Image (cartoon, rainbow, N blue to C red):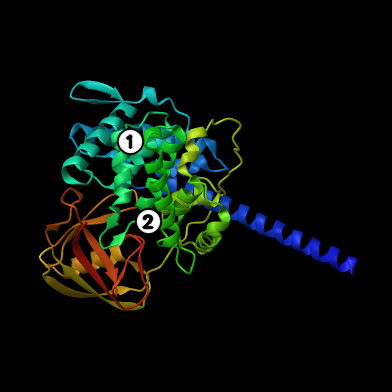
Amino acid sequence: MLYLLLISLVALASGDCDTESDNTELLRSLNKNLLRSLDAQDGLPNPSVHLALRLSNYHNLAKESEHLNRLKNNLHSDIQNSLSNGQSVVGLVALYTLALKSSCYDLNTITFTVGEKSQTLLTHLKLQMEQEKEHIVFSQRPLTNYYQYSLGVLALCVNGIRVNNHVSNKLIKAVAHEHFQHGDAESTDTYAMAGMALQCVKDAGFHALNAAELDIALSKIKQKLLAAQRTDGHIGNEFSTGLAIQALLAMGSQVEEFAASMEALRTDARSNKYHNPMALSQILPALQQKSYLTVKGKDCLNEDDTLVLEPIDPVVVLPSETKVAVTVEVVTSESAAVVYTVDVPKGSSLLEALDLLKGNNAHFTFETESSLWGPFLSVVNGEQARQSDRRYWHLSSDGSALTEGIRDFKIEAAQKITIKNTSY
């Protein structure tokens, strides 16, 4: 009997080691994929990707340093142009701040000049947050949205900048009144980001006079996130789960409370669900049981530098000879609908399908704008859906909302794509 017990214990220990080894290998593989995305980036360097690389346990310091320089040059210039044009870019400024902080960069040396007046990055972030706060006072919502507002609070807080009580109060009230909507649904991503922001505020003692109110907001956010957990483990959807786990970790939840969500992330990651760099950048910290709050204590000392990118043969994907029929319905802001059809090669992205439709039908046109998630629809048939107007193009396939962007969503079978001008 004792012999059998020892054999069982050895088997269990071996199984745990195998699992740990598998998870380590998965993390290193994801990290390498994120590093490779730096060379494939089109457009501006992504501060969220840099943040995830810097929060990782594994590093390629040379490539990270190279990307940091691109952020300080290319992204910095883009933000400078936006600020000079009076645009509200609080989310991008906040992510830029977090990315620099994750590299232990001296933020006091980063400045922007607006109206011949030069001020530091953190000063501009504070000014942007004041503008957002004032807009809430008069319009009951930020200039941008509560996700970006939460990012702004978080970025100020992790850098040790005292967050004005009037600013954090607006976020607390938004939680209380459940203002985190995106279309007809609650935004899991926004609850997650607000949770990290308000937890940072609490930890820093910035809201001591209204501690009870802050605790109630944090408790509600935690309840919302856990209640959004689906039977398959995802919280909200597969692209919200990473941020949700980060928030739960930051708010002190034990991993056992969302073990199914962690396993769902690992399963999706192994099946290459997260090939979009932005998606990867949100799940990698979560899988390493870290959150954006971890940036606060980053010291950049004695870092691992063992991540080496092996050369890989380029994958040539030949167009499929199998065609599938796609119906595209465009619904305007006035609820007028027009329907088109197009045959596309199986496996085409939605963006490729729309390009084909545009080439085959002079009555269908569209334009895109770049974002950290990739291109998104901004104009369809001459009608805009702009953030400044609180509108966006809502995409669905056979009635189910798309969770991926137009470049990532693949068309594998005949279906109906609905593009609807929607307010939020």
Left or right of residue 374: residue 329: left
User: How far from the left and from the top, in percent, is residue 407?
Assistant: 33, 60
Tell me which amino acid carries mark 1.
Answer: Asn
User: How far from the left and from the top, in percent, is residue 248?
Assistant: 48, 51
Question: Is label 1 in a helix, a strand or a loop?
Answer: helix
User: How far from the left and from the top, in percent, is residue 281?
Assistant: 45, 49
Measure the alpha-carbon separation of dots 2 and 1.
31 Å
What residue is at 37 percent from the left and 51 percent from the top?
Answer: 191
Q: Quadrant of residue 360?
A: bottom left
Q: Which residue sits furthest right?
A: 2
Observer-nearest of 120 and 371: 120
Observer-nearest of 209 and 83: 209
What residue is at 36 percent from the left and 76 percent from the top?
Answer: 321
Residue 44 can be seen, yes or no: no
Q: Disc 2 or 1, which lies upstream in sequence?
A: 1
178 w.r.t. 347: above or below: above
The residue singled out by tag 1 in the image is 74
